[in-house]
Image (spheres, rainbow, N blue to C red):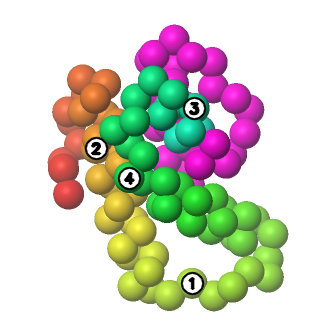
Amino acid sequence: MQQAIEKNLKGYLILHGKKPPRIHELDTLLNRISEFDDSLVDFMDLCEKTSRYYIEARYPPGSPLEYEEIKDDLDLTWKLIAKIRAKAGISDIEQR
């Protein structure tokens, strides 16, 4: 999840002529995007939470994750990616 969101956010920055920073914090990337496009800020909670997933997965022991929570966040991830791709003029992903 984290890497999919990160790559899409960085790609959106590049699409708009911005050099993406060499970071993995999704909320920081989304803040950069919100400087020129605030239509994605509704996904800030997802970005903050998913950044924590990334840290917990790479540097255990992290807190156990619940299936339903992960499923809900994955659904939100697909919505965010679909929205970014639609804004970029790419429509080959199914809107969930």
Residue in the image at 32% along x and 65% along y: 75
Element on which disc 4 rests: helix
Question: Label 3: which residue?
Answer: 32
Q: Residue type at mark 4: give it.
A: Asp
First in residue order: circle 2 vs circle 1 = 1
Query: Between marks 4 and 1, how big is the CA–CA gap?
Result: 22 Å
First in residue order: circle 1 vs circle 3 = 3
Element on which disc 3 rests: helix
Q: Residue type at mark 1: give it.
A: Leu
Q: Residue type at mark 2: give it.
A: Ala
First in residue order: circle 3 vs circle 4 = 3
Q: Are marks 4 and 1 in contact (CB under 8 Å)?
A: no
Question: Label 4: which residue?
Answer: 42
Residue 65, which numbered label? 1
How busy is the neighbourhood of tag 4: few (under 14 within 10 Å), some, or many (20 plus)?
Answer: few
Q: Residue 90, how many percent across, how many down?
A: 25, 28
Residue in the image at 79% along x and 77% along y: 60
The magenta segment: 1-28
The answer to whether residue 53 is above or below residue 20 is: below
Nearer to us of marks 3 and 2 is 3
Query: Between marks 2 and 1, how big is the CA–CA gap?
Result: 25 Å
The answer to whether residue 86 is above or below residue 46 is: above
